[in-house]
Amino acid sequence: MESYFQILKVNLKFNLIPHVLIAFLLVLAAPFIMGLENLNPIQVAQTLEVYTSLLGIILMVPLFTPDQDRNIRDLIKSKKEPMIKIHLMRIVEALFFLSIIVRLFLLNLKYGQSEFPFGKYFYGTMANCIFLGGLGVIIFSIIDHLAVSYMVPILYYILNYGSGEKLGMFNMFSMMRGSFIEKNYLFSVGVLFILAAIVYRHKK
């Protein structure tokens, strides 16, 4: 158990902490970028889907960044813990911080007297984050290029602006129309992306 905590501690210190800080800064900056008080459910959904969904890209895509350093990769391989377990622990840690930041954002909305179903909107936002983050993670796993791994989910996010309805069940902006069915598909595929990326990286 102690070795697990050490893995999480090292990942947080040398890989995840800058991305956590950026995500927190985006949340703190939100009230200065848009109004967060007295919003109705549609306005809250729009804020979450258009703004908060990007947190998944920030926190999840750098999953394999430490492995790009050959010395670090060789050091990790020399340890008794398999790489696949280390990657799983890294993504769980990223999801933990992601869930905390999303909850803080929703609590801030509640504090500002905005009306919305907390649980459903939390799930819908996390589904978007996991899908976009998972898309970036699987691209990173395959091509091992961080910049492109950021660009692909961002391009998909932009695609939703002009062609969201054409994407069917993978429309990220469905919550503002009152539909949550799409979130189940986004969540499921996002999780599959993450698992496939970790397995592929392990075999690679």
Image: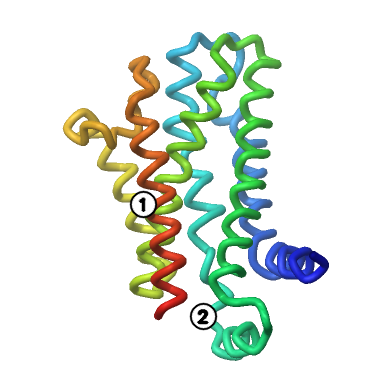
Q: Which mark is residue 176?
A: none
Percent from the top left, x then y, of residue 56? 50, 47
Amino acid identity at mark 2: Gln
- At 43% across and 23% down in the image, what residue appears? 46
Q: Residue furthest left?
A: 166
Percent from the top left, x then y, of residue 6? 78, 69
Residue 26 lies left or right of residue 177; in this view the side is: right
Q: Is residue 173 above or below residue 64?
A: above
Image quarter of the C terminus:
bottom left
Q: Assess disc 1: are there few (<14), some (14-19) or many (≥20) residues with their C-alpha within 10 Å of its C-alpha.
A: many
Amino acid identity at mark 1: Pro
- At 55% across and 89% down in the image, what residue appears? 70
- At 54% across and 78% down in the image, what residue appears? 67
Mark 1 lies on a secondary structure that is: helix
Instruction: Write down the residue under mark 2.
Output: 68
Residue closer to the observer: 74 or 148:
74
Residue closer to the observer: 95 or 105:
95
Instruction: Write down the residue under mark 1.
Output: 153
Q: Is residue 194 above or below residue 164?
A: below
Residue closer to the observer: 90 or 160:
90
Image quarter of the N terminus:
bottom right
Q: Assess disc 2: are there few (<14), some (14-19) or many (≥20) residues with their C-alpha within 10 Å of its C-alpha.
A: few
Residue 116 lies left or right of residue 133; in this view the side is: right
Percent from the top left, x then y, of residue 190? 40, 47
- At 52% across and 70% down in the image, what residue appears? 64
